[in-house]
Amino acid sequence: MTERKDELAANLAKVERRIAAACDAAGRGREDVTLIVVTKTYPASDVRILSELGVRHVAENRDQDAAPKAAECSDLPLTWHFVGQLQTNKVRSVVGYADLVQSVDRARLVTALSKEAVRQEREIGCLIQVALDADEGGRGERGGVGPDGIEELGELVARSPGLRWDGLMTVAPLTGPYAGRELAAFERLMDLSTDLRRAHPAANMVSAGMSTDLEQAVAAGATHVRVGTAVLGVRPRLG
């Protein structure tokens, strides 16, 4: 375990240096960017080590992995983010441990999250996942709603009991006009966030950037970056 802790500490320090350098280059304070460590496929023991190392935000993308892991780590001072595509039949489980769902992309999901949040007497933060590769009125290859669908879906979140509209999330698209143009994609997300905050100033979270493109996300103005491999390394999938 000591060897694994040393490995995670070294990786975490490298990522912290990258974020700090990106913030410095962008004229931003390091405190302006929150690191979310994506712990998908990694065991609860790694989550516990990360908590010991000072990590406070972790993310999962599959409920079948996340639910038992969150239960095992329920004593830790962590904020849990759900970042994967969420089916409505998993909502009851996810609402039981997730503090934020970053992948909200359709009205049916909003309705299910609201109903379950009220039932469990919880407040769930929601990010609208924006698909920058979506056609008008469509969804993206990696999930998400097109920019034209943000306002309607977000307004539904804002008026749904048990939910809180916290902002926007995106994944750099693999196809379409922003493919291979991560900085441009993240700058587009920031423009959408600026528009959003005129009517909903509290919805100021912008989640963008992963292990390979966190610098571009910070340069564009992201408030949160989601980093998995650069911290945890490449490991076989669980199960």
Image: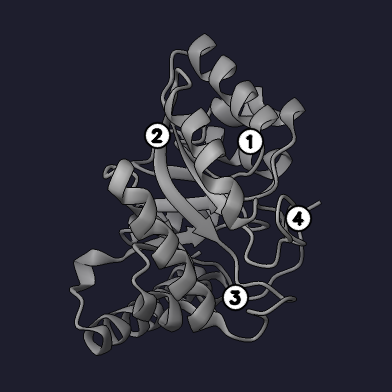
Asked if disc 3 and disc 4 are in contact, CB closer than 8 Å, the reply is no
For the residues marked 4 and 2, what is the alpha-carbon distance in whole angstroms?
A: 23 Å
Tell me the kind of residue under disc 2. Asp
Tell me the kind of residue under disc 4. Leu
| Vertical comparison of 115 with 211: above or below | above
Tell me the kind of residue under disc 1. Pro
Give SS at disc 4. loop
N-terminal of the pair, mark 3 or mark 4, is 3
| Vertical comparison of 177 with 142: above or below | below
Q: Residue at x 43, y 20 (%)?
A: 122
Tell me the kind of residue under disc 3. Gly
For the view shown, which residue lies furthest in the top direction? Answer: 119
Q: Residues within 10 Å of mark 1 (few under 14, many from 20)?
A: few
Point out residue 62 in the picture as x, y percentages from the top left corner. 70, 46
Point out residue 12 in the picture as x, y percentages from the top left corner. 40, 74
For the residues marked 1 and 4, what is the alpha-carbon distance in whole angstroms?
A: 12 Å
Numbered tag placed on residue 238 in the rendering: 4
N-terminal of the pair, mark 1 or mark 2, is 1
Give SS at disc 2. loop
Tell which of 13 and 28 is nearer to you.
28
Q: Which residue is mark 3?
A: 233
Q: Which residue is mark 2?
A: 75
For the residues marked 1 and 3, what is the alpha-carbon distance in whole angstroms?
A: 22 Å
Asked if disc 1 and disc 3 are in contact, CB closer than 8 Å, the reply is no
Point out residue 89 in the picture as x, y percentages from the top left corner. 76, 26
Q: Which residue is mark 1?
A: 68
Point out residue 55 in the picture as x, y percentages from the top left corner. 36, 58
